[in-house]
Amino acid sequence: MSARIAGFGHLGIYVKDIALMTEFWRDFMGMQITKQSDGAVFFSSDPERSDHEIVIMQGRPSTDDPHLINQISMRVESLDGLRDFYRRIKERNYQIDQLVTHASAIGCYFRDPEGNRTEVFWVTGLPSWAGVGVPIDIERPDEEVLADVHAVWDQVRHVGVGEKPDAETQEAIRRMRTGVPARA
């Protein structure tokens, strides 16, 4: 049997004014910032239970533009379940935007038949509060995949809940994302 979705993950929303929308989700709605960067802020109602349920992303051109949804993310139970979805996504020739590790999860971002950005992801069990997405090949043995996940986690694990990574960590993330080796 094919892998199935285990539950809703989070909703990504494009916003025009990230400061205004941060105030709304944090102060008015009462959610906690768990991760942030210059262009994105992640919120959770309970960081112990869920890394994030809402993410706002800079990118909405105007308040009149209906371009609101950044992504709809759905969780799977296992790395093998993610592999199954990845293979079926490729079989259907759905456009794959990226397959990345966030350290806390591995996500496959793709376009549904009508072009909506969708993510299926597996939670690795590593707490990571840095917004990171490093390309990963999940068609290798578990040990190799997890070694790559841990290598990313080792670079970002010091970032606390709601903290923006410092310049050195941002540079390490950029290098990992682009495949540039770390400085010796």
Image (spheres, grey):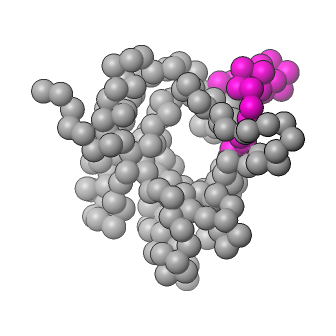
Residue 123, position in %: x, y?
51, 49
Q: Is residue 149 left or right of residue 159?
A: left
Residue occupying the point 12% across, 27% down: 184
The boundaries of the magenta stretch are 10-33
Q: Which residue ends up furthest to the left in the rendered image?
A: 184
Numbered-mark total:
0
Across and down, in percent, residue 127 comes to 47, 34
Residue 73, above or below 90: above
Question: Which quadrant holds residue 153?
Answer: top left
Residue drawn at (63%, 29%) of the image = 41
Q: Residue 68 or 48: which is nearer the viewer?
A: 68
Quarter of the image holding residue 80? bottom left
On-image quarter of the N terminus = bottom right
Q: Residue at x 31, y 55 (%)?
A: 145
Against 53, residue 72 (above or below) is below
Q: Position of residue 79 (x, y in %)?
A: 44, 61
Is 141 within the magenta? no
Task: Kindly identify the residue that appears in the image at 61 percent across and 70 percent down.
Answer: 4
Taking 48 as reference, is 23 above or below it? Answer: above
In the image shown, does 174 or 82 lie closer to the viewer?
174
* Any part of residue 105 in sight: yes
14 drawn magenta: yes
Viewer-proximal residue among 141 and 100? 100
